[in-house]
Amino acid sequence: MAAISGASSISLRSTPPRSHQNLALSRTNGLRSIALSDNGRSSLSFGLQQRSVRLSVSCAAKPETVEKVCTIVRKQLALPDDSAVTGESKFAALGADSLDTVEIVMGLEEEFGISVEEDSAQSIATVQDAADLIEKIIEKNKA
């Protein structure tokens, strides 16, 4: 009998198939545990490893900040007003090269009345990254 309990990866070993076997499948504890057996003889065995979960926490910028950044990106890249630019949009995917990205950052600085350090500017890859950075800088300047 083999059992599975809340795993991220599974390795399988199988014995040669026997003709006309009846396999029983039982579930316990919701979908976190599964057992396979064929009248007491194991036909499958499972090796399980627990994997760590990587969490990312971020404070999303206000929707109006994201929309302003989208507008500036469209303008800087000469994209049509109806082009799909969202918080998840990557500058490179929108056709921006490194010079375009510098011009976008300059446009953001002008629009929001902020100054973006070079190190911070290099970490901006998406519209959301830019909006989050803008709000972080604005909050820092208020303090």
Image (spheres, helix red, strand yellow):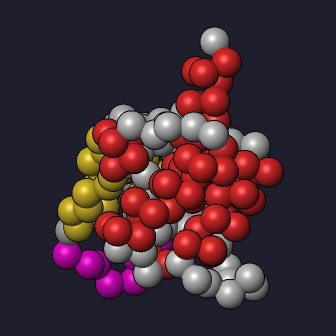
Q: Residue at x 39, y 37 (%)?
A: 117
Bounds of the magenta segment? 16-23
Query: Observer-nearest residue: 67 or 34?
Result: 67
Q: Is residue 114 visible?
A: yes
| Percent position of residue 37, x then y | 42, 58
Q: Is 54 placed above or below 88 here?
A: above
Confirm whether the magenta stretch covers residue 19. Answer: yes
| Percent position of residue 49, x then y | 29, 41
Query: Observer-nearest residue: 5 or 66?
Result: 66
Q: Is 7 placed above or below 76 here?
A: above
Left or right of residue 63: residue 107:
left
| Percent position of residue 80, x then y | 68, 87
- Predominant SS along the magenta part: loop
Q: Is residue 31 visible?
A: no
| Percent position of residue 130, x then y | 54, 50
Q: Is 136 placed above or below 11 here?
A: above
* Outermost residue to the top: 143
Q: Residue at x 32, y 67 (%)?
A: 98
Left or right of residue 88: residue 21:
left
Q: Residue at x 26, y 61 (%)?
A: 12
Query: Observer-nearest residue: 48 or 52?
Result: 52
Confirm whether the magenta stretch covers residue 106. Answer: no
Query: Observer-nearest residue: 41 or 95?
Result: 95
Q: Residue at x 63, y 12 (%)?
A: 143
Residue 18: name its quadrant.
bottom left
**Could you tell me how many numbered marks the image carries?**
0
